[in-house]
Image (cartoon, rainbow, N blue to C red):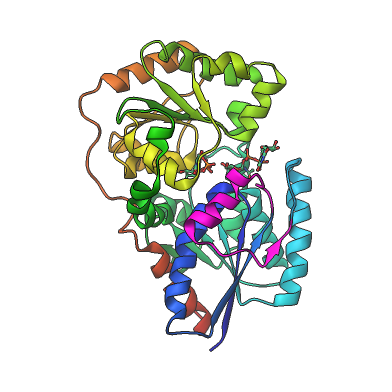
Amino acid sequence: MKIKLCIVVGARPNFIKAAPIITAIKKFRKDHKDLNYFLIHTGQHYDENMSDVFFKEMGIPEPQYQLNIGSGNHGKQTGEMIGLIEEILLKENPDMLISIGDTNSTLAGAVAASKLHIPIAHIEAGLRLFNKHIPEEVNRLLTDHLSSLLFVPTKLAKENLVREGMKPSTILQYGDIMYDATLQFDKIAEKKSKILKDLDLEKEGFILVTVHRAENTAHIDHLKIILDSFVELSAQHKVVMPIHPRTKNLLKEHGLLEEYAKHIQVVDPLGYMDMLVMEKNAKLIVTDSGGVQKEAFFQETPCVTLFENTAWVELVELGWNTIVPPISTKLITKSILKVLKKKTKGKKGSPYGKGDSAELMLGKIVAFLSHPKF
Ligand code: UD1
Ligand code: UDP
């Protein structure tokens, strides 16, 4: 039976999560040439170091469709994506659309497919922050409710979907796709990356920080609360920040980039290989990124998350992640220093599967399409 899949990506975390699925498809195709796929890149992220680098490093083929949407207000950005994806779906008529994560590109793919009655598989379904002001919460929730296959990374994500009335047989817990990616690329990264040397860093000699979430970067006052804490820390610790373009733009707009860069080692966004090596070798990670919180755990580096809560509660329960709402510089600094002083890093645990989630998901997708009454 011939099967054609469409995968939609657009933003940095989409590319990273798509890579293991594409690896699984390539492997499957060795014996099953009747499985085909095509890739749509919405162009939500477009800088070389926010997009192309991941395609090159992770062996993701050139997308068949590049929509070049670019930045903009969420409604316009998502709406334009939907229109263009719809045109492609009408032409290609795939059997299933795969949407990944929680970005505007994730939602756009799901909405376009649902209008054409093309079944959707959502990878990284079910996570909830219980706050609909957060754009990612809305994207994930709506995508979940449009999807026929809900691939949840955790037990809690599964429970959330059951509570929301989703059919239990459509909820599939095969592990976390980012764990697959880390296992697939960790050794390669260690061999290839020269980032510690390039940035003149010692192993465990620096704190790695990333800040980009809308809630922390919409207003300069919020961002200052966080960065002022990094300045305080820099008196005792080297602080390295690969800067997201959104954060950089805000600092530049307020003429503050150079001032902060006197204390914090600000570098351009890193490729995935360099990022894995930085995460592994940092003494602590401080972040508001969903993905980086998890990678900190995969790399056995303690993490402080600057957000009101997290969907990855297992990390908090195991003691690897400490949630600090970024409401005051004093609180952030105090909390980070406390985590740094802790002797134990966290408890062992494997809440994210075995690193084979992409193959399991693909197997289920093929079974679903081969037996449509599933
Ligand atoms: C998006 C996702 C967020 C994810 C993040 C990963 C949504 C709603 N948000 O947020 O979930 O955590 O990606 O990084 O989908 N910009 C550039 N160059 C680029 C990309 C962005 O300069 O290549 C700048 C633009 O000024 C843009 C801003 O960054 O306006 C924000 O980009 P956008 O894609 O809207 O949201 P992110 O904050 O990146
Ligand atoms: N990442 C990267 N380079 C960077 C910062 C992050 O490769 O400079 C990777 C990181 O390793 C993780 C993913 O980007 O795999 C996380 O994406 P991001 O923080 O942009 O978004 P989120 O996970 O919060 O949606």
Identify which residue, 300 or 373, lies in the foreground.
Answer: 300
**Residue furthest out toward the bottom:** 1
Examine the image and state in which quarter residue 305 appears: top left
Q: Position of residue 207 (x, y in %)?
A: 39, 26
Query: Does residue 165 lie above or below 3 as drawn?
Result: above
Residue 307 visible:
no
Q: Which residue: 55% across, 18% down? A: 261
Relative to residue 206, is residue 223 drawn left or right? right
How far from the left and from the top, in percent, is residue 72?
Answer: 76, 41
Q: Which residue appears at 55% of the width and 50% of the height?
A: 53
Residue at coordinates 48% horizontally, 78% vertically from top-left?
366
Q: Position of residue 247 (x, y in %)?
A: 61, 29
Q: Nearer the viewer, residue 254 or 312?
A: 254
Which region of the structure is painted magenta? 43-67
User: Is residue 361 depicted above or below 370 in this figure?
Assistant: above
User: Does any portion of residue 285 appear in the rendered image?
Assistant: yes
For ligand 1, the image quadrant comes to top right
User: 149 or 13: which is nearer to us?
Assistant: 13
Q: Is residue 341 magenta?
A: no
